[in-house]
Image (spheres, rainbow, N blue to C red):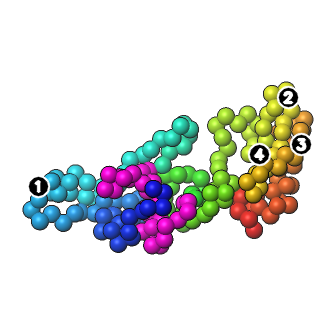
Amino acid sequence: MKNNLPAREFLLTRFRYEPETGILYWREKSSNGDVCTQQWNTRHAGKEAGTIKRTKRADHCYRQVSVNKIVYPAHRLIFKMQTGLTPDEVDHLDRDALNNRWFNLRDCSHASNMKNLTLRYNNRSGYTGVVANGKGRFIAQVGHQNKMIKLGLFDTAEQANTAVKLKRAELGYNATHGEAK
């Protein structure tokens, strides 16, 4: 289902998108006197499309939209409307999944998207790639090409974080986003 987005032309007839605000609005349906369509237009036309979907992580949610009884993430529909392309994954550059402004969205691979994750809610070290081992020490690790590279055990989270940053730089990753240079 991930790659089966509706056609761009269809989406453009159903939605209006404002790139500056990132908001997707329902367009009015042509009614031909149909009572159900008139009721739909009264209820939805001109209003923001979709609902907010909360994930298992309490700090993560995104907008989803039902089109012909199939639910899609709004950012995927927006990307298709703007480009005509079906993205592998859509990444939010600022990591805010509710911020669907056009400048904040990009097509990317799953691996690249995983490098742009926010700090996990259960992370006790305070740093991405640094894990508390439960014995007062910290493990440094970096994911690269579907493998986890263990960098060692450190006395402080800061030391482990320094090792992670150095390894990411050595691998050619941008420190602020995880993209390869």
Locate residue 155: give its quadrant.
top right
Question: Mark 4: few, some, or many residues within 10 Å (few <14, many ≥20)?
Answer: many
Q: Is residue 65 magenta?
A: yes
Q: Are circles 4 and 2 on residues that touch, CB within 8 Å?
A: no
Q: Which residue is mark 2?
A: 136
Q: Which residue is mark 4?
A: 129
Residue most extreme to the top? 135
| SS type, badge 4 | loop
- Which quadrant does the C terminus fall into? bottom right
Amino acid marked by disc 1:
Val
Amino acid marked by disc 2:
Gly
Q: Nearer the viewer, mark 2 or mark 1?
A: 1
Amino acid marked by disc 4:
Gly
Q: Are circles 2 and 1 on residues that touch, CB within 8 Å?
A: no
Q: Which residue is mark 3?
A: 152
Question: Mark 2: few, some, or many residues within 10 Å (few <14, many ≥20)?
Answer: few
**Mark 4 vs mark 3, CA separation in Å:** 11 Å
**Mark 4 vs mark 2, CA separation in Å:** 16 Å
Against 176, residue 30 (above or below) is: below
Q: Which residue is mark 1?
A: 35
Question: Mark 1: few, some, or many residues within 10 Å (few <14, many ≥20)?
Answer: few
Which is more toward the observer, 85 or 138? Answer: 85
**Mark 1 vs mark 4, CA separation in Å:** 57 Å
Question: Residue 73 location in percent, x, y?
Answer: 45, 54
Question: Residue 23 location in percent, x, y?
Answer: 41, 59
Question: Residue 26 location in percent, x, y?
Answer: 30, 59
Q: Which residues are magenta?
A: 63-90
Which disc number belongs to residue 170? none
